[in-house]
Amino acid sequence: MSHTETTDQAKHTAIFAPSPRPRITFGTAILVLLTVILVFGGFYLMGAAFSVPEEQAFWVFAAALALDTIGFWIAFGIIPSRER
């Protein structure tokens, strides 16, 4: 058995090595689902803000911006910090 055969064999077994990161937990999956709902709900409300009366449009748009901010904060702030 030559050196190239052993390195080729090591490469093939490395493919099936277990992942160093654990699987996604149930809590993380719920947070991802909540994030998706918040962000896309905020996008929908931003579009809907242009079809409501002008007196309410600012508040609908501000609520949509708040939903998007919370959604992105969960996605990029809370979820990565839970995995450490």
Image (spheres, rainbow, N blue to C red):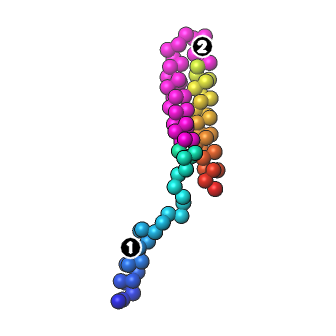
For the C terminus, the image quarter is bottom right
Q: Earlier in the sequence, mark 1 or mark 2?
A: 1
Q: Quadrant of residue 5?
A: bottom left
Q: Position of residue 27 (x, y in %)?
A: 58, 45
Is residue 60 visible to us here?
Answer: yes
Q: Taking 77 as reference, is 14 above or below it? A: below
Q: Which residue is mark 2?
A: 56
Residue 37 lies in the magenta-colored region: yes
Instruction: Specify the amino acid type for callout 1.
Output: His
Q: CA distance from mark 1 to mark 2?
A: 62 Å
Between residues 38 and 50, which one lies in front from this camera angle?
38
Between residues 24 and 15, which one lies in front from this camera angle?
24
* Residue pictured at 61% horizontal, 53% vertical: 83
Q: Which residue is mark 1?
A: 12
Q: Taking 56 as reference, is 37 above or below it? A: below
Q: From the viewer's perspective, is 2 left or right of 20?
A: left
Question: Could you tell me how many numbered marks the image carries?
Answer: 2
For the N terminus, the image quarter is bottom left
Q: From the viewer's perspective, is 39 left or right of 1?
A: right
